[in-house]
């Protein structure tokens, strides 16, 4: 489940462009997973977007309880 999502748009992506999307597991703390992500030009010269996220693992039964 997404607990937090932060996106920073750094530069526009022209229509029809090819981009490189990279994501990395930054760290784990129990049920918490901290993720880093970036969207760059294919040659890496331009950063278009960067993001951080916190995901928390929960059981399916927790979701079904409502």
Image (spheres, rainbow, N blue to C red):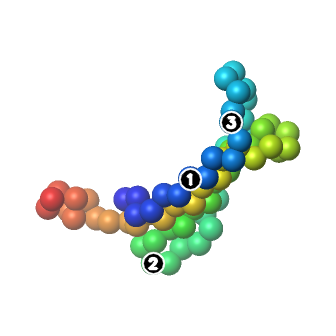
Q: Determine if residue 9 is in view.
A: yes
Q: Position of residue 55 (x, y in %)?
A: 45, 63
* Residue drawn at the location 80% of the way across and 43% of the way down: 46
Quadrant occupied by the N terminus? bottom left
Q: Position of residue 44 (x, y in %)?
A: 83, 44
Nearer to the camera, 59 or 40 = 40
Look at mark 3 in the image and give the residue it sits on: 12
Which residue lies most toward the left here? 65
Q: Tell me how far mark 2 sits from mark 1, CA to CA.
A: 24 Å
State the SS at label 2: loop
Q: Is residue 25 left or right of residue 4?
A: right
Nearer to the camera, 51 or 35 = 51
Q: Earlier in the sequence, mark 1 or mark 3?
A: 1
Look at mark 2 in the image and give the residue it sits on: 30
Q: Is residue 4 left or right of residue 20?
A: left
The local crowd at label 3, few if under 14, some if 14 to 19, many if 20 or more residues have their Cα within 10 Å, is few
Locate residue 24: give its quadrant.
Answer: bottom right
Look at mark 1 in the image and give the residue it sits on: 7
State the SS at label 1: strand
Q: Determine if residue 23 is in view.
A: no
Q: Position of residue 32 (x, y in %)?
A: 46, 71
Decide: marks 1, 3 in contact (CB < 8 A)?
A: no
Q: Earlier in the sequence, mark 2 or mark 1?
A: 1
Q: Position of residue 66 (x, y in %)?
A: 15, 59
* Residue drawn at the location 48% of the way across and 65% of the way down: 54
State the SS at label 3: loop
How many numbered discs? 3
């Amino acid at each position: 489940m997404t607990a937090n999502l932060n996106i920073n748009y750094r530069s526009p992506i022209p229509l029809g462009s090819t981009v490189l999307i990279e994501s990395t597991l930054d760290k784990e703390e129990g049920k918490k997973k901290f993720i880093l992500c970036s969207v760059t030009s294919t040659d890496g010269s331009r950063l278009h977007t960067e993001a951080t996220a916190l995901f928390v693992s929960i059981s399916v039964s927790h979701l079904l309880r409502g």
